[in-house]
Image: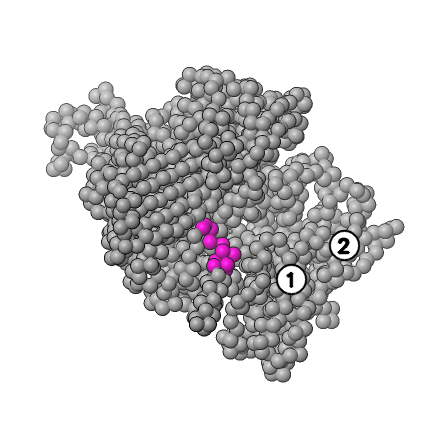
């Protein structure tokens, strides 16, 4: 969409940039996650893990991972999740850890289940396990001379008295920080991000509109690129809210913004167009190479906007949020000090 | 939480007044409900219990409008969305549509009524400034000794403070009359903390008509909201322009005169500066609305330095 | 209350029922008819999660007393499917990944439907205006706009409906945009969140919360509340059988206030009753006597000597201090060509997930306590609850219900403990649904920070030394403060190679709403300061802020601020990619907006001026009424 520039005294535009980094999974402590997998009848699979989907799309990510590991389709994967009495520990939805920790645990569990299936098939076919591959719902020899469906393979495996199940546990070996100097290895995987923001400022009201954000983030490996984009867009907009309008206020300990009329969130009319580019620098220490995106997506946005405001009108906002009141006050201060400089220059 | 023991939906004004009489001292009148329900919550009104709610929104007589000479008479139940969308209303009182597009959102506008917005008397009510500028007058009706009486009250006298009006017990605002504004250009300026569903920090309605081939102000109407206990008409700012030539200096002066109306307890300096800018911008936008070329005026107007 | 009879048509079915007159249309749909697709996000018309059609007009059902819907035709999200299949708009939401947590989606789908009904050719700006009453906290709206446009074009026949199909059905699936496996339940409103669930014999819980920021509790008298008909149980801290206390890092918060309240909104007692109205009325009959205490609201006051102590076992009010030390900052800073200092402030932030906290708790057939709630950390909550309830760990079962947004705010166990106490007392299922107001005051916020930043730089822009001091308001309880301080400190100096560095992150108790986990866990606060400060430094050094960053970025093999040797570092590639994507123009001055040539490129939206839609011209003659 083209946004024609308005040449005007009133509206001013500017751009800012900011970078960020972030660590994946729990900080400065060992992190772990477990999963169980079963290749099931009909060429389907069951994945059981204590994963907690909070809307980011982790269940879909795990289904995609399981599908590739087992040679089936995501829609053939059933994920039993989120029940401490029925599934292995995978711990919390946070720390940008789920794709990394649970994704890898699921991959490991699937590999074990697949190995069990292939072992039976190898004995049945009297060939080496290394010569058997699963993909696209089929299981075959490398040279494709023998090929059956995964559904048939599961049946065959069970007829031999074996249920193709597996389990996986993934560990992230983080170390604590030295209490004196803070040294330590808090994470094994780091991600990096950068964003550019373009703003338009109404110099008569102090309103800032963020018109565009261009974001680049390293996610290790994007399991579902659209989902990664969704996390970037959501993070950017949450940060736009924090940068321009959101402010939880208390007066002497009494909350004064206790509803959504007082606590202001961005609406569809307040959000920028967001363009993303996904960088893949795979993590070498884990089976899948994936890292994460949930949290870092919102880190560079606020400083990029604040830097853009400076670019547009030459005032630097030091405290969030940059409300119209703050921006207009800063513009006024700048004008006043320019005047006094002018005056003192004249008096000399 | 909102509780009530009885909920009445009268279809006529007669029925409504009968209900008011039967439930004397224990009733609550409700129109769109878009202010009352959010009010009946923690941190605001809390748990409120009304014995009888009288919902007047289905009284069809109060949903009509007519042109009466150079005035428009609107039923109090006209919704804000009708002000935005109805072609007749857009033509005759276009400033209301300009204000309505800023009013909450499409969905709330479908329910919220003009009468309700005026009676609710929020200092930041978006419908009040344009209505003040159009010399709105309210019809208040009440049943007394079996007879429906009515009185008329100008809007600026009706609203007396935040949430306070001259509405008396048993009275209903049934109609709102205002000038039809053919030939006027209009503008509505508003700033809050976002672009939709937002309460005005400052809002301004401006109406301008020109004479002498666009060289003179024939009439100017200005009213402000959000800057004090009640929305205000800017008579001084208006009279400094009426019958005067269209000049930058005068527009600046008019804007200057508006600044002292800021009486809010918070964000005063901000509001003063925005009021100045809005009056000036509102006048220019209203002039542009009558398709006169005021680019030159626009260019010459500079930000003011001091708003103290 | 005098019930009255209401009739309407809901999703094509005639409905006739006698109802209590205080119900809103939303309550009627959800609680009486069990059409739970429409959600309550705020109860005040501010979020649109409850949007439905009333006689073809989109309305917020939380603002509508049910009597207003008499004899109307209601359409909800559950009515959108066509012959058991997703309609075009639903498929478009699926295709673009427009639903994340899904809680706003029922209302959002209805608003998008309304936009396209009002104008089948609506452009993006008009669509945005028409969605202006519906808040989404997850998606940033982009994919919702895309979905609405895609549906518009497919319905108009300008795009083929093939575009609604999944792009890759063959695999490999890693790297492809597989459809979200939960989409269809989210775009049809069939997914049940905790507040949508019901069980036979279910009770409703309400919680009495502190009206004071700091007070001693002298007495809690629950007898009048307990005596009320319909009240099944009242619980206080006296009902805790085990070791009371929860938190993410230390267990400093009692399930229900014990002797003291430390913030406005802290839970004190709870009522379980046959219905919500009775539970609310019973709360008012609980009498609490308080002795108000001095209040600390500023972190800088909390660390003054002699300041009021908020937790008896933490006399200095410091929740956590994380130091990082490297090199010799004093010496190198003194020798730097430029030393640039400034202070940055960030505010407390509400998560504002659209789904307020809710839970359903009950006993399994074998007596195991079960709590279904949108908890972001069921594993941790299970451990805490077993200890609080003095139960073997396998007698506590936590099930995560569908989460309507979390962002860290649902990591704290703010109410599951209360529900557990009530269930063990009543031995009946209990549901508890927060109001928006309750959610805002009771739950943790993003930590506000005061960040003093000092950088020493060489004339050519190399960072020589960095000193960062961060003071943060942890509020009344620890929650995740310890971890937030740690992450803020580790990442504070940014992805830059710095040999000499002092970082301190200090979180302190106050009587404000507790601060806790929120997306980035302290890192956006500390890096906000870093990235603003670098631009300030570039200005002082008359450098391009991009150049300044490029020359200081961490590289493969560098040591981090915590002396960890890094493997591959993608920072440079990432940074250059963002600049390239934005078509960034290099330049020295930091305030050059008016002279830039890279503004207004196609990645921008037009500025919002309102008024994107067109209105029909007058066709009726003057004088006619509506």
Q: Please tell me how crowded label 2 is: few (under 14), some (14-19), or many (20+) other residues with Cα within 10 Å.
A: some
Instruction: Kindly indicate the quadrant of the structure image that contains residue B249.
Output: bottom right
- Percent coordinates x, y for residue C445 in the rendering: 47, 39
Colour scheme of the rendered structure: one colour
Residue B204 in sight from this viewpoint: yes
Compare residues C67 and B50 and report the one nearer the observer. Answer: B50
Compare residues C130 and C543 and report the one nearer the observer. Answer: C543
- Percent coordinates x, y for residue C236 in the rendering: 57, 23
- Return the mark for residue B25: none
Residue B290 in sight from this viewpoint: no
Residue at 72% over, 56% down: B159
- The magenta stretch is A319-330
Quarter of the figure that contains the C terminus of chain A: bottom left
Q: Earlier in the sequence, mark 1 or mark 2?
A: 2
- Separation (CA) of disc 1 from disc 2: 22 Å
- Return the mark for residue B166: 2
Residue at 72% over, 61% down: B156
Secondary element at image label 1: helix
Image marks 1 and 2: residues in contact by CB distance under 8 Å:
no
Q: Is residue A280 above or below residue B278?
A: above
**In the rendered image, which residue does mark 1 sit on?**
B261
The answer to whether residue A327 is magenta is yes
């Amino acid at each position: 969409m083209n946004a024609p520039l308005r040449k005007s005294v009133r509206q001013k535009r500017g751009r800012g940039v900011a970078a960020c980094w972030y660590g994946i999974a729990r900080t400065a402590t060992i992190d772990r996650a477990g999963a169980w997998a079963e290749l099931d009848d009909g060429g389907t699979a069951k994945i059981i893990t204590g994963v907690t989907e909070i809307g980011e799309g982790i269940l879909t990510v795990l289904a995609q991972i399981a599908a590739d590991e087992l040679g089936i389709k995501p829609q053939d994967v059933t994920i039993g999740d989120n029940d401490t009495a029925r599934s292995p520990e995978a711990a919390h939805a946070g720390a940008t850890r789920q794709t990394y920790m649970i994704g890898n645990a699921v991959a490991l569990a699937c590999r074990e289940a697949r190995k069990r299936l292939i072992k039976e098939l190898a004995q049945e076919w009297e060939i080496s396990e290394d010569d058997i591959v699963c993909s696209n719902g089929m299981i075959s020899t490398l040279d494709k001379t023998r090929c059956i469906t995964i559904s048939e393979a599961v049946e065959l495996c069970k007829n031999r008295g074996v249920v193709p199940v597996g389990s996986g546990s993934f560990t992230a070996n983080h170390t604590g920080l030295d209490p004196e100097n803070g040294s330590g290895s808090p994470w094994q995987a780091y991600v990096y991000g950068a964003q550019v923001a373009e703003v338009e400022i109404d110099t008569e009201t102090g309103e800032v509109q963020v018109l565009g954000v261009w974001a680049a983030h390293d996610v290790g490996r994007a399991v579902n690129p659209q989902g990664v984009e969704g996390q970037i867009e959501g993070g950017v907009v949450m940060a736009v809210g924090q940068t321009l309008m959101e402010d939880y206020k208390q007066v002497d300990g009494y909350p004064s913004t206790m509803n959504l009329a007082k606590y202001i969130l961005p609406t569809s009319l307040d959000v920028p167009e967001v363009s993303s580019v996904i960088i893949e620098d795979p993590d070498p220490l884990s089976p899948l190479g994936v890292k994460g995106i949930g949290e870092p997506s919102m880190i560079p946005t606020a400083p990029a906007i604040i830097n853009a405001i400076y670019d547009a009108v030459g005032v630097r906002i030091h405290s969030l949020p940059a409300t119209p009141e703050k921006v207009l006050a800063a513009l006024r201060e700048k004008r006043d000090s320019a005047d006094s400089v002018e005056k003192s220059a004249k008096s000399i | 939480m909102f509780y009530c023991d009885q909920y009445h939906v009268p279809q006529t004004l007669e029925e409504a007044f009968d209900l008011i009489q039967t439930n004397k001292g224990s009733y609550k009148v409700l129109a769109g409900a878009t202010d009352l329900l959010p009010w009946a919550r923690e941190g605001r009104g809390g748990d409120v219990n009304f014995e009888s709610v009288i919902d007047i929104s289905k009284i069809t007589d109060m949903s009509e409008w007519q042109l009466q000479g150079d005035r428009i008479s609107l039923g109090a139940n006209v919704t804000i969305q009708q002000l935005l969308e109805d072609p007749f209303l857009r033509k005759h009182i276009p400033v209301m549509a300009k204000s309505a597009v800023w009013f909450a959102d499409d969905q709330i506008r479908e329910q919220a009524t003009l009468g309700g917005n005026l009676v609710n008397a929020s200092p930041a009510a978006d419908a009040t400034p344009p209505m003040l500028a159009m010399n709105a007058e309210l019809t208040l009706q009440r049943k007394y000794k079996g007879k429906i009486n009515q009185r008329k009250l100008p809007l600026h006298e009706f609203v007396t403070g935040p949430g306070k009006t001259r509405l008396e017990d048993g009275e209903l605002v049934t109609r709102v009359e205002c000038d039809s504004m053919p030939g006027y250009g209009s503008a509505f300026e508003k700033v809050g903390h976002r672009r939709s569903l937002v309460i005005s920090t400052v809002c301004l309605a401006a109406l301008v008509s020109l004479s002498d081939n666009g060289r003179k102000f024939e009439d100017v109407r200005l009213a402000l909201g959000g800057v004090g206990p009640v929305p205000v008409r800017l008579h001084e700012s208006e009279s400094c322009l009426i019958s005067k030539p269209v000049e930058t200096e005068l527009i600046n002066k008019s804007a200057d005169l508006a600044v002292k109306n800021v009486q809010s307890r918070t964000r005063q300096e901000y509001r003063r500066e925005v009021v100045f800018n809005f009056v000036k911008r509102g006048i220019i936008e209203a002039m542009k609305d009558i398709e006169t070329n005021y680019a030159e005026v626009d260019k010459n107007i500079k930000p003011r330095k001091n708003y103290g | 209350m005098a019930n009255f009879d209401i009739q309407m048509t809901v999703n094509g079915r005639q409905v006739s029922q006698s109802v209590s007159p205080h119900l809103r249309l939303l309550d009627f749909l959800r609680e009486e008819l069990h059409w739970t697709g429409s959600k309550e996000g705020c109860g005040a018309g501010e979020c649109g999660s409850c949007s439905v059609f009333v006689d073809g007009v989109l309305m917020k059902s939380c603002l509508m007393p049910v009597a207003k819907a008499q004899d109307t035709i209601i359409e909800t999200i559950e009515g959108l499917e066509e012959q058991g299949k997703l309609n075009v708009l639903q498929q478009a939401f699926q295709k673009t990944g427009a639903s994340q947590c899904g809680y706003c989606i029922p209302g959002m789908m209805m608003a998008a439907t309304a936009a396209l009904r009002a104008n089948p050719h609506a452009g993006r700006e008009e669509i945005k205006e028409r969605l202006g009453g519906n808040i989404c906290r997850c998606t940033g709206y982009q994919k919702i706009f895309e979905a609405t446009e895609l549906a518009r074009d497919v319905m108009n026949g300008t795009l083929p409906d093939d575009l609604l199909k999944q792009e890759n059905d063959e695999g490999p699936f890693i790297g492809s945009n597989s459809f979200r496996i939960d989409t269809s339940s989210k775009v049809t409103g069939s997914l049940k969140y905790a507040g949508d669930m019901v069980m036979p014999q279910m009770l409703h819980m309400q919680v009495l919360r502190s009206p004071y920021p700091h007070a001693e509790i002298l007495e809690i008298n629950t007898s009048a509340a307990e005596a009320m008909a319909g009240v099944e149980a009242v619980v206080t801290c006296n009902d805790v059988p085990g070791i009371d206390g929860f938190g993410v890092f230390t267990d400093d918060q009692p399930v229900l206030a014990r002797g003291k309240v430390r913030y406005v909104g802290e839970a004190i007692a709870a009522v379980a009753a046959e219905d919500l109205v009775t539970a609310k009325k019973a709360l008012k009959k609980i009498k609490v006597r308080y002795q108000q205490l001095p209040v600390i609201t500023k972190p800088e006051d909390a660390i003054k000597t002699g300041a009021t102590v908020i937790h008896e076992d933490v006399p200095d009010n410091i929740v956590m201090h994380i130091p990082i030390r490297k090199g010799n900052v004093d010496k190198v800073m003194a020798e730097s060509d430029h030393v640039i200092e400034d202070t940055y402030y960030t505010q407390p932030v509400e998560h504002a997930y659209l789904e307020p906290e809710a839970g359903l708790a009950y006993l399994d057939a074998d007596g195991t306590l079960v709590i279904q709630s949108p908890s972001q950390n069921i594993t941790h909550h299970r451990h805490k609850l077993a200890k609080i309830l003095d139960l073997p760990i396998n007698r506590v079962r936590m099930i995560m219900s569908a989460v309507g947004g979390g962002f860290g705010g649902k990591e704290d166990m703010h109410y599951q403990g209360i529900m557990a106490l009530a269930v063990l007392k009543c031995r009946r299922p209990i549901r508890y649904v927060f109001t928006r107001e309750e959610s805002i005051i009771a739950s943790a916020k993003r930590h506000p920070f005061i960040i003093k930043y000092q950088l020493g730089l060489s004339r050519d822009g190399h960072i020589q030394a960095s000193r960062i001091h961060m003071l943060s308001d942890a509020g009344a309880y620890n929650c995740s403060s310890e971890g937030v301080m740690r992450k803020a400190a580790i990442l504070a100096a940014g992805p830059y190679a710095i040999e000499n560095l002092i970082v301190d992150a200090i979180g302190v108790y106050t009587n404000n709403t507790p601060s806790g986990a929120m997306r980035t866990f302290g890192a956006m606060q500390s890096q906000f300061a870093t990235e603003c400060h670098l631009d300030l430094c570039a200005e002082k050094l008359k450098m391009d802020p991009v150049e300044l960053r490029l020359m200081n970025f961490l590289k493969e093999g560098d040591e981090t601020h915590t002396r960890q040797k890094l493997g591959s570092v993608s920072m440079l590639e990432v940074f250059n990619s963002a600049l390239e994507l934005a078509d960034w123009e290099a330049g020295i001055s930091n305030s050059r907006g008016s002279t830039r040539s890279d503004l207004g490129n196609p990645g921008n939206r037009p500025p919002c001026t309102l008024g994107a839609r067109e209105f029909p011209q007058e066709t009726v003659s003057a004088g006619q009424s509506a």
